[in-house]
Image: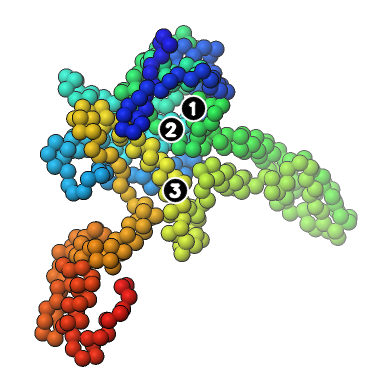
Amino acid sequence: MAGSRAAKTTVAGETVTVEEPETVQGDDDTWLSGTNKYGWPRGREALEAREIVQTSAMQSITNGIVDQLVGGELAFESETEGEADGVEAEVQELIRDVLTGPHLMDDDLDDLLTAAVEDMMGPGNAYWQLLSSEDGSLPVVSLIPLDALTIRHNYNRHGYPKDPPYYQASSAFSGDSIASMSSMNPTPLQAEDLAVMHYPKGRRTHKVYPVSPSLQVREWLEILANSTTHHNRFYSDNEIPPGLIQIIGSQNVDDVKDKIQAASGDPRDVPVIGGEGGAQWIELGGTAVNLNIIEEQRWFFQMCLASLGLGKQELGFIEDVNRSNGEVESSRIYKRVTGPFAKQFHKAFEHIASQFDAYNSLDEPFKPRLRFTDPREERAREERLREMYNAGGLTLRQYIRRRGDDDLADEDLTVELNGETVDYGDHPKHVVDALLRDARTGEDANSDVGSEPK
């Protein structure tokens, strides 16, 4: 089709072009205008999502996710064993320099990750622009994050990318208002110009752009906003909520009125007890529970966490968390949050690496990855190493080194028994057991026979 850009994917190691479908994609997104001349518009709800993610509740959750991601080590995963050398090692260092920065505006990789997490939590997408060297000798030398609200995806009604596949409509949003098409000055962007990320659990068939956690709690926030307006009206300095005073026994009504007017704001606190029977306030409308602002804030915070599939204890937001369940909770956080977000960054890293001819000419020999503690993988890896050691596939020194304790692995792993020095660090476990038995005499010699590996 004229104006379309072929969509490509990789199957069995080969790049193939995807056939353009005849089906039509849903378009329930709120439109900025009646046309998608410069890509699919982002509606007002995208602006609302930006405002929601900037609330204190969402900011604290975003910070918790960022804490799980930043500070990691950039690593290169390869199917081949051993350290990379030659051209592959040079390409690794080149890509490491590009990813780690420094980037424009003095950003480093952690800054880029932080900005991307907030955009994925808010509007739903995150974008890094790939900047080449001025002389064109290198396809990427620096990265800069772009405001997600300004980027439009340029698909046709079948979901097939057009040419160009993206536009930056930099003036589409102006303050709190949405500009008209006549005021837009769109910048065309090719696929090689951007690294595109999206909220991992936000795909919906009736939406072009992801439904982020902020959009998922938008309705709840509207309820909270209405309730806040309700509070502001009822708890103003010169108003009280509607209700009735029930005077029990014989009291001076004027005295009761004076006490209420003196404490207008919340008549429940007015000291009207006295006389023979006292008095009580009967509310018409808001109750003490419905007018509890702190509880509503807590409720909204829990809704924000629920949009990510998490509880307060899993991000450490409560004091009485059961620390004995910490390992289980860490695994749950990685599965639901850290892992899916990291996967988006890994795709972006691979896209950046693929811009270099040297990387492609080596048939993509490695994958750039963020390496940080994955509790599930750490436990599985520890178990694999222990099994290999007990089966004789690793010496104790190799086992210790692969666990990451290089200092201990470099120590003298020998023991003197009955005047004989036994090296238990550089032999497989079954050989060490035999050497220890030979070094012992009498009753001790049979003590290890038939013993199970620890």
Q: Local crowd at mark 3 within 10 Å, few (<14), some, or many (≥20)?
A: some
The residue located at (52%, 12%) in the rendering is 35
The mark that comes first in sequence, 1 or 3, is: 1
Q: Which of 123/174 is in front? A: 123
Q: Are the residues at dot 3 and dot 2 in contact (C-beta closer than 8 Å)?
A: no
Amino acid type of the residue tagged 2 in the rendering: His
Residue 34: x %, y % from top left: 55, 12
**Split into 4 quadrants, where in the image is the C terminus?**
bottom left
Quadrant hosting residue 248: bottom right
Left or right position of 298 against 115: right
Disc 1, SS: loop
Identity, as a three-letter code, of the amino acid under mark 3: Lys
Q: For residue 192, which numbered disc appears in the image?
A: none
Direction from residue 381 to residue 88 in the image, left or right = left
Identify residue for label 1: 209
Q: Is 58 rendered above or below residue 197?
A: below
> Which image quadrant for residue 346?
top left
Judging depth in this view, the residue of 28 and 220 nearest the camera is: 28
Residue 335 bears which disc, if any? Answer: 3
Cα distance in 3D space between marks 1 and 3: 23 Å
Residue 337 locus on image (x, y percent): 44, 45
Q: Which mark is residue 198?
A: 2
- Where, by quadrant of the figure, is residue 191 drawn? top left
Give the x, y percent position of residue 444: 23, 87
Q: Are marks 1 and 2 in contact (CB under 8 Å)?
A: yes
Give the structural element (helix, strand or loop) at label 2: strand
Q: CA distance from mark 1 to mark 2?
A: 8 Å
What distance separates the C-alpha of mark 3 from that of mark 2?
17 Å
* Residue 52 percent location from the top left of the image: 52, 34
